[in-house]
Amino acid sequence: MLTWMAAFIFACSHIATNAIKYSVDDQICQLPIHLSFLSVYNPFCIYIIPINGIEFIYLKLIRYVKEMNKRATIVNILLRAKKELKMVFRVVILISVFLIFVFMRFMTSPPKYHFRIALTLIEISLVFVMIVLFKFTDPVRTSIMKRINRRLDIVVATII
């Protein structure tokens, strides 16, 4: 319910200001790329508020892992907590780099067909992500290889 309310509140500002325009080059309705209230409001609601939540959790995890180091704990639990901490740190770094690109759009004007170019690059990167997942994640690799190499068990009725 909270998600629906947040989505409705987020969309109301776009509808009230009539800011969404149709881009003929990209054949898509989107917010024009220029400095305005909505171009600051969007990244704030979509990225900055959730990132602050992730960073808050990250800081709590750091404190928790440091407290675990002070106490006598099982080594496996400590190593797992450190791996999770490293994963959250990487997520924060990735999203922070993405935010830099979001704010760079105010300093440059996009080329014609920029949406199509971005979509093509995203599709290509998804192929590489799938290849990396297949290569470095054993459960995914074994599951796919099972499906590829699956024998067909054929049951044949015999007449005696």
Image: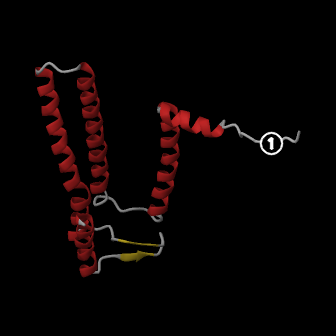
Residue 36, position as x, y percentages in the image: 22, 70
Residue at the extreme right of the image, as rendered: 160
Task: Name the residue tied to disc 1.
Answer: 156
Residue 150, position as x, y percentages in the image: 66, 38
Image quarter of residue 148: top right
In the image, 116: left or right of 62? right
Question: At x 27% / y 73%, what residue is drawn?
Answer: 11
Question: At x 30% / y 42%, what residue is drawn?
Answer: 91
- SS type, badge 1: loop
Residue 142, position as x, y percentages in the image: 55, 33
Three-letter code, disc 1:
Val
Q: Quadrant of the C terminus?
A: top right
Return the residue nearer the eye: 153 or 58.
Answer: 153
Q: Is residue 60 above or below residue 121?
A: above
Return the residue nearer the eye: 138 or 97.
Answer: 138
Q: How many marks?
A: 1
Residue 2, position as x, y percentages in the image: 22, 65
Q: Is residue 134 above or below residue 4?
A: above
Image quarter of residue 61: top left
In the image, 27: left or right of 43? right
Coloring applied to the structure: secondary structure
Question: At x 46% / y 65%, what residue is drawn?
Answer: 112
Q: Quadrant of the N terminus?
A: bottom left
Question: At x 84% / y 41%, what residue is drawn?
Answer: 158
Binning the other alpha carbons within 10 Å of mark 1 as few (below 14), some (14 to 19) or many (20 upward) gives: few
Q: Is residue 62 above or below residue 121?
A: above
